[in-house]
Image (cartoon, rainbow, N blue to C red):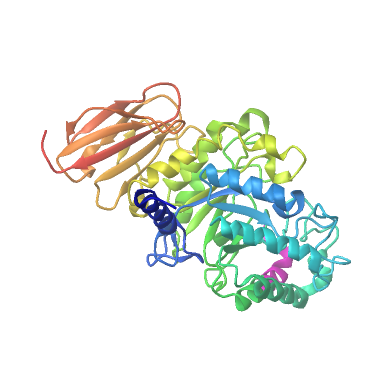
Amino acid sequence: MLSKGLLFLVCFSLLSYAQSQTAFPLKISADKRHLTDQKNVPFLYVSDSGWRLFTGLTEAEAKEYLLKRKSQGFNTVHVMLTAFPGDKNRQGQEPFADNDFLKTNEAYFRHVDRIVALADSLNLLLAVAPLWYSCCNDGWGSNAQQFMRRNGKEKCYLFGQFVGNRYKKSNNIVWIIGGDNDPFEYLEEVRQLARGLKQASPQQLLTYHAASTHSSTDVWPANESWLDFSMVYSYFRGFPKAWNKVQPDVYEVSYAEHRKHPVRPFILGESTYEGEHDAMGSALQARKQAWWAVLSGACGHSYGSPFWKGDAQWRTYLDLPGANTLKHLNALFATFDWTTLVPDATGELLTKGNEKYATNDYATAALTRDRKLAVVYVPSARGLTVNTALLTGKLLIPTWYNPRTGERRNAGRYPVGYKMLFESPDANDWVLLLKVEDGGR
């Protein structure tokens, strides 16, 4: 029998766990800048790109993977519902017979059902792509096979209805229409898929995964009623391996998305994957694009690694160093109301030291609406000149935050109202926190 003290601790732990749970389904915030749960608690979207989760892993392996990512601070997984044409799950099952969208394989979808339920039991969001369009002639939007054209608009609509009806009670789902490409000549087929899904399950949010350098709202009109939130996608200037050769940096496409009207929440849906493209897929690059996104107006970001392939080496990708450092972004943002951050897109706060715009070494900054806190991310060593006159209060308390370890280093106390120079602690990336209080020295 439990002692009263132990019983209290158990009950307190269960209560704390319940209070920390996200109340799915997600919805759009009142200001349309971010996502919230049903209790209006802001949801910082932190995703892993687990695209072939349903086909590459068994259910037991899927549980191992989801538990691992949850322990690393991820709250969302991007996944393809039907993978690529010809792909089978580990039981040898395909989603369709004859690649016909109405000839669905019940055994395949029961496997999906169980993993969706598992993710829900772990309070993890799944962002699911029903029919991956594809950049590279190997998806359901493939020009070579014309799967969408052969199925036609009506079957696309009816498959959307099938998917929406099957998963409308799965509150831990949002939907990704498209996939690594713009809709091009299959625009109406894609639109009908989205409309069918939205009509069957109106409470579940939808976005669109466009081609790199484009966002959802670049390729769909402002009045597209099914498009609930947007997704930006880019690598960085000088990145040589994308088929769109001029790649803006993540903060560039994020600033552009943040300025758009009508306002929609947006996330960084995809960028450079850690562990791919040699040195370009570094842990530093994974951190840069995450911090750039959230300080440039995004309400979340997505990380990627070779895990997306769902191959036999999948476990070796789970502890890449970048993945294990992103939890420090989450930890910091949990300490203040990050939904009030406004990007310093014009350089009024950070006046020097941000380095050249449209390069892969740029420093980004954001300021809370009450001007009591500023956050600056610096990818490499430099001096930063900050206009503290933009901050509201009397006493400035600067802190260096290590995005690799979560360590904090106090940087003194100063009166507010001057342009001040701060030198980053070493050659690595750092975050400068500028907190203001009303008291004196």
Q: Is residue 342 visible?
A: yes
Query: Of 438 and 376, which appears nearest the observer?
Result: 438
Q: Is residue 276 visible?
A: no
The residue segment tinted magenta is 182-193
Find residue 397 and report its horizontal and vertical position in percent. 23, 35
Q: Residue furthest left?
A: 440
Find residue 68 and report its horizontal and vertical position in percent. 59, 43
- Say whether residue 186 is magenta: yes
Find residue 264 and report its horizontal and vertical position in percent. 47, 63
- 169 left or right, relative to 385: right
- 404 left or right, relative to 156: left
Find residue 289 and report its horizontal and vertical position in percent. 52, 41
The answer to which image quadrant residue 103 occupies is bottom right
Q: Residue furthest top?
A: 426
State the predominant SS element of the stretch in magenta.
Answer: helix
Residue 333 lies, with reference to residue 279, above or below; the image says below
Q: Give me the residue at 68% from left, 33% from top.
A: 277
- 61 left or right, relative to 176: right
- 431 left or right, relative to 217: left
Q: Residue furthest front?
A: 1
- Say whether residue 344 is magenta: no
Q: Give me the residue at 44% from left, 47% from top.
A: 294
